[in-house]
Image: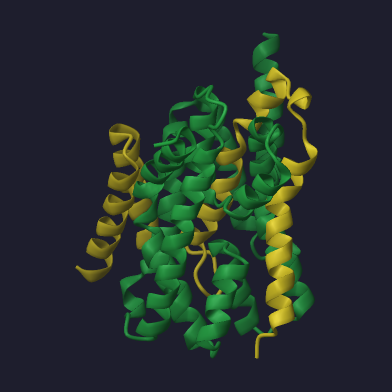
Amino acid sequence: MVEWSLIIYCGLITFFSRYLMIAILKKEMFTDRIREVLSFVPSAIFPAIIFPAIFIDNTGNFLLEDNPKILASIIAVIVGVFSKNILATIFTGLTAYWFLIFF
Amino acid sequence: MSNKLKIFFKGVTDVSPLMIPVVPFGIIFGVLAIDLGLSPITTMGMSIIMFAGASQIVFLQLFSAGASSLVILSSVGAVNARHLLYGAVLSEHMSDIKMIWKIIFSYFLVDQAFAVTNPYLKKSSDKNKVFHSFGAGATCWMIWQTTTIIGIYLGSIIPDKLGLSFAVPLTFLALIVNDLRKLINVIVIIISGLIATFGYEIIPFKAYVIVAAVSGLTVAMILTKSKSVN
């Protein structure tokens, strides 16, 4: 049984993680240097979601061999870099993955 | 049409391509939750109260593994820590707006909204430009709630074999694919990815996300500094 209080606490922690910086930081605090470093935020965070989802299976094991997600991701990256198209990247990756697991 | 509304709809349009992979993600969440024995009301409550896909999935994973409330709460906190960085990036553009708007925009500040609003805010000089994030976030909200409902109804009809959860990393991959043209970004991406992968089991409370992100940012800070000195 999931308790509502836990969901509400999780909701609050989610909200404040989004609100805190917006509430306390002021425009004057931003220098070009800070802006430059912050521009790397997507490159620093998204791989932390991407890599484990590709290399680690549901039971927490690291999978390097016999892992169709790796090849499918490489194909998606190649298509993405050349097409610069978000949808093409996602669909190529999914199609490649289905091709690899079903054929 | 008022200027605010126009910018709002620009956010809706910009974020729309990113919604396609959110569809299977939301359905997966609904299906998983029902599979784990959550009631439809609780499942819906999670999507409305938390409105955070990755955190909700982590919540379910830990809950099904029998984790304590404290572990679930701290893990959700760790997964959410990336929002601190989003807020830091966007706060520059939001410092002049009313508090009520800050609260509303914050609730809607999801990954996909950040991804499309950040570049928009950088190039726009319109005083109402922050409504872009509202449009993008509200679009995500509609899709997320709708697909949660669909997932609840579909229950276990969708075969696991289809591997729809793979759409999640692919979405994030698509968001950084342009950064792969820049050497420093590639180094940051690889370092963050490797730390997350190898820290996945070692770093407690699923804090691997934030440990990897902070490490990646530190490397970016060092590399950009040495570049500007030379």
x and y percentages locating residue B113 in the rendered image = 50, 46
Picture quarter with the C terminus of chain B: top right
Q: In this view of the protein, can residue B207 be seen by the observer?
A: no
Residue at (57, 53) in percent of width and height: B108
Residue at (33, 34) in percent of width and height: A84
Picture quarter with the N terminus of chain B: top left
The answer to whether residue B140 is left or right of residue B213 is left
The image quarter containing residue B49 is bottom right
The answer to whether residue A87 is left or right of residue B54 is left
Residue at (73, 62) in percent of width and height: A13
Farthest-out residue, top: B230
x and y percentages locating residue A99 in the rendered image = 22, 62
Residue at (51, 73) in percent of width and height: A58
Colour-to-chain, yellow = A
x and y percentages locating residue B179 in the rendered image = 47, 32
Residue B217 drawn above or below residue B71: above
x and y percentages locating residue B16 in the rendered image = 36, 48
Farthest-out residue, left: A103
Residue A62 drawn above or below residue A79: below
The answer to whether residue B164 is left or right of residue B67 is left
Colour theme: by chain
Q: In this view of the protein, can residue A98 be seen by the observer?
A: yes
The image quarter containing residue B154 is bottom left
What colour do you see for chain B? Answer: green
